[in-house]
Image: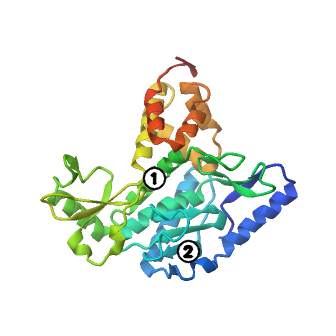
Amino acid sequence: MENFSSFERVVGNIHDSVKEIVLHETKEQFRNQNFESLIQRERQKTPEELQILSLANSVTNELRREYGLSDFDIPAENIHIITDKAWGEGKDEQGSFGLYQPEFQRILLREQLSNMVFLTIAMHELLHFKSYNALQVIRGGKGKLGVYRSGLRIQSRDGKTFYLNGIDEAVTEELSQRLIRKFSDHPLFAKEEAQTKKILNQYPGALRAPSKTLFTPDVYYAQLKEESKGKKWLKAVGRIFGFKKAIKEEPDILCQEMAYPQERKIFNTLIDKLYEKNFDQISNREAVFNVFAKAMLTGNILPLGRLVDGTFGKGTLWRIGELDHDTQALEEFVDSLDSTVISGITSK
């Protein structure tokens, strides 16, 4: 398949011919993945990692086709494995195990010794790469370019503020977990799946804190610490991707959970409320989820705006975006949403 970039358009007050030049340059960046800054930090991919990336490319293309989009293969060359020792040296690497960097048309992944964890992180970042992306000319930036849209995430025209990032991450992670379940019986992951089930069944009472269970429904990988000797990658704990550790009488157990738990909780509350208020017009809860997923992948956010604002009042989606930087305030706002829908018209 012919290589192209993730950017589909350029927004801003510049001539169409200049926009074409900019898009051409992003295609060149997509093809050129020789970064001097990564030479000492990056390592070659293993055959297993290449196979996992191929699987992830395949299922994310299947997802794109479900939403009427063409295939978009991300070459292995655009995905860079950074050694555990070097991870954290780059911008935004602290607190995460993977990054999609649209300006460089690349993904950075921290090396992992678990196939399941590597697949999970790679799938999430590939979905960001394959969602709708657009550039913009920053207002007041003297011709400076920046990202305007990345999935549901919107950057203000002055380039200073992001909106809907948390909802975008929640939708991305929910989609990622659905795709990952397709590989539960695959030979690359079967051993780790069996190991995880064994540990969860053997230590159901394991705690991460007093009266707080270790094995939440979000846990998808577990390993006894004594069996991970020398695996420094297991020690990394971040806000986004991090391992949780058992305490008290249970042996040391390290487990991996789905990412963005707070953002997904808020998102699922919003989904439930939207379905509850529109059950007479929407066939099932999954149909509500699909409105968000389609907006993220295709870039057409208007149906999502009509659904949210039509249910809870004009400006609701924008308010959700404004509160993105304050998770607690956003959760309180979504929890407070209530309305009665009559023939598509909202009354409070």
Q: Which residue is mark 2?
A: 76
Which quadrant would residue 303 be assigned to in this image?
top right
* Residue at the spot 36% in from the left edge and 71% down from the top edge: 233
Q: Which residue is mark 1?
A: 173
| Marks 2 and 1 in Cβ contact (< 8 Å) | no
Which quadrant would residue 193 be assigned to in this image?
bottom left
Circle 2 — which element? helix
Picture quarter with the N terminus: bottom right
Q: Which mark is residue 182?
A: none
Residue 343 visible in this rendered orientation of the protein: no
Q: Is residue 170 above or below residue 125?
A: above
Circle 1 — which element? helix
- x and y percentages locating residue 319 in the rendered image: 57, 33
Q: Please tell me how crowded label 2 is: few (under 14), some (14-19), or many (20+) other residues with Cα within 10 Å.
A: some
- x and y percentages locating residue 41 in the rendered image: 52, 79
* Residue at the spot 80% in from the left edge and 56% down from the top edge: 143
Q: How many marks?
A: 2
Q: Please tell me how crowded label 1 is: few (under 14), some (14-19), or many (20+) other residues with Cα within 10 Å.
A: many
Horizontal relation, residue 22 to residue 191: left or right: right
Whichever of callouts 2 and 1 sits on the residue coming sooner in the sequence is 2
* Residue at the spot 42% in from the left edge and 77% down from the top edge: 48
**For the residue marked with disc 2, what is the amino acid?**
Ala
Residue 81 visible in this rendered orientation of the protein: yes
Color theme of the render: rainbow
Q: Is residue 51 above or below residue 203?
A: below
Q: Is residue 80 above or below residue 66?
A: below
- x and y percentages locating residue 153 in the rendered image: 59, 48
Q: Work out how far the residue at label 2 is from the one at label 1, CA to CA, in angstroms.
A: 21 Å
* Residue at the spot 44% in from the left edge and 61% down from the top edge: 95
- x and y percentages locating residue 209 in the rendered image: 22, 51
**For the residue marked with disc 1, what is the amino acid?**
Glu
